[in-house]
Image: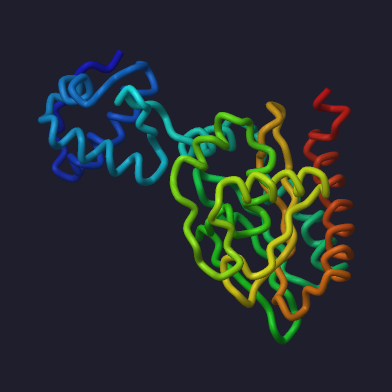
Amino acid sequence: MINSMPKQNDDSVLSSVDRALLMVEIIARNENLNITNLARRLNTGKATAFRLARTLVARDWLIKKSDLTYALGPALTALNNVATSGLDLKAELALVLERLHEITGETIHLTRLEGRKVVYMEQLVSPKPVLSVATIGDYSPAHCVSPGLAQLAMLDEERLEWFLSKPLERYTDNSITDPQALREELAQVRQRGYAVNVGSYRSDVGGVGRALLGGNGQPLAAISICVPVYRLPPSKIEELGAHLMKAAALAEQKLGLSPAALA
């Protein structure tokens, strides 16, 4: 068990980073630790421990519970799920993503839910003159983009409650900021089989997305088709949704995540 802050003789080690990582390790090994407990185990002042914890909470690496103790946050557990899944999603799904790209002629994204955001893992850019792109490694708010909505729709109630414990930020007039409205939208996603975004994050960008579930029934990643809004009438949404559903089924088979495999 880690009980105190080890002395560092290497001048190249940043003490604040070292303490933050040690705090995460301590919380991973111990439950129900508050700031006083953490400060003692880190051998530092309560003010320093509080600043470290507040930073980690802001990045969703930790969560602060109602009893003022700390636990590992969803961003960290999401990284752990991917690391322990044994899957190189980009490599495993390359052919599926390329085929979807060829069929639709639109930008294709592979994303992962991390806390309240999705991170872009892979992108195949549309060859059309007007296109919508992201940057690999960048984040988008999960409640405003189709791959985020697709993954939120498949969360268990505890994780969804956590997601809704903070206000939903508005980015455009189409952003969903009411928790009940978001719950209703997620119910439609589950019924439809895929999520739809029409200008909720950027007013001129939309798309459709579907989650891929891991063996625990929780979202592992999402595949989405990103399209300028002017190319996204209702009939096009249905067409892209149908292509996406087929691609997702192939992806789940390739990853061994088909319903039969999960039963």
Residue depicted at 73% across the width and 54% down the height = 195
Q: Nearer the viewer, residue 208 or 27?
A: 208
The answer to which image quadrant residue 57 occupies is top left
For this rendering, which residue is in front, 14 or 207? 207
Q: State the count of labels.
A: 0
Q: Is residue 47 above or below residue 152?
A: above
Quadrant for the N terminus in the image = top left
- Residue 194: % across, % down: 78, 51
The structure residue drawn at horizontal position 54% and vertical position 37%, both measured from the top left corner, is: 78
In the rendered view, does 62 fall on the left or right side of 81? left
Q: Position of residue 164 (x, y in %)?
A: 51, 42
Examine the rendered structure and indicate whether residue 114 appears above or below residue 172.
above
Q: Residue at x 57, y 70 (%)?
A: 173
Residue 201 percent location from the top left of the image: 57, 66
- Identity of the residue furthest to the top in this view: 1
**Relative horizontal placement of residue 25, taking residue 120 as reference (left or right):** left
In the rendered image, the vertical position of residue 41 relative to residue 73, given as above or below: above
At horizontal 51% and vertical 41% (from top left) the residue drawn is 163
Res. 130 image quadrant: bottom right
**Which of the image's four quarters has the C terminus?**
top right
Please give left or right for residue 61 compared with residue 155 in the image: left
Q: Nearer the viewer, residue 143 or 72?
A: 143
Image: 46 above or below 147: above
